[in-house]
Image (cartoon, helix red, strand yellow):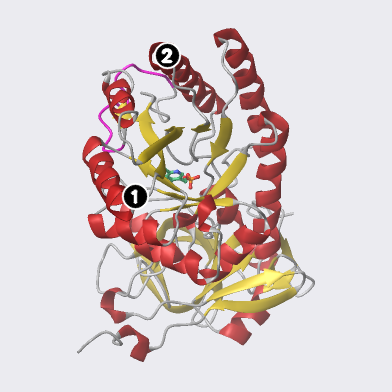
Amino acid sequence: MMKELICDNLSVNESDHLCLGGQDTVLLAERYGTPLYLLDEDRIRLQCRTYRKAMTKGFGEKALPLYASKAASFKQIYRIMQEENMGIDVVSVGEICTAHAVGFPLERAYFHSNNKTDADILYAMERGVGYFVVDNREELDAIERIAGEQGKVQKILLRLTPGIDPHTYEAVSTGNVDSKFGSAIETGQAEEITAYALTLPHLHLSGFHCHVGSQVFDADVFLRSAAIMLNFVAEMQKRYGYVTEELDLGGGFGVRYLAEDPVMEIEKNILAIGEAVSAQCEELGIDLPAMRMEPGRSIVAEAGMTLYTVGTVKRIPGYKNYVSVDGGMTDNPRFALYRSPYTVLLANRTEKADAEEAMRCSVVGRCCESGDILQENVRMPRTVARGDLLAVLTTGAYNYSMSSNYNRIPRPPVVMLRGGESYLAVKRETPEDVCRNDL
Ligand SMILES: *Cc1c(COP(=O)(O)O)cnc(C)c1O
């Protein structure tokens, strides 16, 4: 097997074509056109089931994974999450509207964001969003006021920062305390906001939330943040008699973008966290709260792939080679934003291309922007030419959801793969769609 086949839903068929979920990408590109987002529904469901099963085993029956829907948000995703009995995170009125439109039970929705406007708060309350994850005191006051006006008691979690910097791999006492999100435990602000929340009559404090970061492979990061959060839970019980009902450890499990990335084993890591958490609760003399985790990337990333057709191939002797494709930063801004690595392959000849003489190139889009790069230093056969089909792997998370209409480029469709069949989940935008709100 080629080393670049970084996820087990990838394969090569007898025509030497790249396959996702056993389906030939060349045929899919012919049927739906390019650029094209593919999402392997079977894989998404498998990830959901893995989380649900592991969390039930590790934390007990009351545990629930919440899909962080900012990773990929459209109607069909919420239908799948409902069928898989997942909860969801939402971060905007648009995500709430999308989930509501397909009848997702919003009592299982958790509303994030570090700056909810009064209009956002009212919108979410009117649609029955179960939980607000509250970032700061001003927001707390606004939610209390609006809940009062609506004559209801709103359940909330408080977002706290445990002070862990996941990418230096150590719990430094100051790390992440300066985050724009949440209230820091270390500075006493977390306790302050907890004590204050407990005095507000239209809010019901269900518990606490933290999220240490994203694309994390070190299980220790989650163990340490869980330990800090549980200590806080015990302290609040001791000082205020407050019993935490729910504890949300956030998302962040890493996925493989490159062959050299490790595999983050979901079940194994959750069971390890479960064991540590149970032991610590016993030690602290507190009951285990209903546990929540918020995976986004690790639910959808590896289910995804983007297909492009190669256009211009430009060779600048002694400098650089460029392979241009019919998409770019408008459908995947992640390299432009933070130089995210991706595996890029020729999809219409894989093993044959692998054996050919290779060149290094930048794979670029067609926006009027020199930063419009999908990936640099990509190995391609020298014969790569207009009309070849190119695949960028692991694009299921934060690609469609971060896409834009820059240069008024219409967005690609999202095609889902299920049990050997494919279907459209989001239509391709037309040029008319792009100007539909213009007056
Ligand atoms: C982004 C985010 C997540 C999901 O993170 P992943 O790395 O995609 O798993 C979960 N919770 C919060 C609060 C987030 O901001």
At mark 1, the secondary structure is: helix
Q: Which quadrant of the figure contains the N terminus? A: bottom right
Residue at position x 28%, y 62% from top? Answer: 371
Query: Which numbered marker is on residue 98?
Result: none
Task: List the residue tagged with mark 1.
Answer: 338
Residue 174 is a magenta residue: yes
Residue name at image x 62 percent, y 60 percent: 82
Helix, strand or loop at mark 2: helix
Q: Is residue 352 left or right of residue 383?
A: right
Label 2 crowding class (10 Å Cα cut-off): few <14, some 14-19, many 20+?
some
Q: Which residues are magenta?
A: 170-181
Q: Quadrant of the C terminus?
A: bottom left
Q: Position of residue 167 (x, y in %)?
A: 41, 30
Disc 2 residue type (three-letter): Glu
Q: Position of residue 376 (x, y in %)?
A: 40, 56
First-in-chain label (2 vs 1): 2
Q: Residue at x 61, y 25 (%)?
A: 273
Which kind of residue does numbered mark 1 sit on?
Tyr
Q: Quadrant of residue 283?
A: top right
Q: Using residue 10 as the reference point, say whether residue 205 is left or right of it.
A: left
Crowding at label 1, few (<14), some or many (≥20) Cα neighbours within 10 Å? few
Asked whether residue 236 is in view, the answer is yes
Ligand 1, by image quadrant, is top left
For label 2, the residue is 235
Horizontally, is 75 left or right of 278 in the view? left
Does residue 176 appear in the picture of this structure?
Answer: no
Q: Is residue 229 above or below residue 300?
A: above
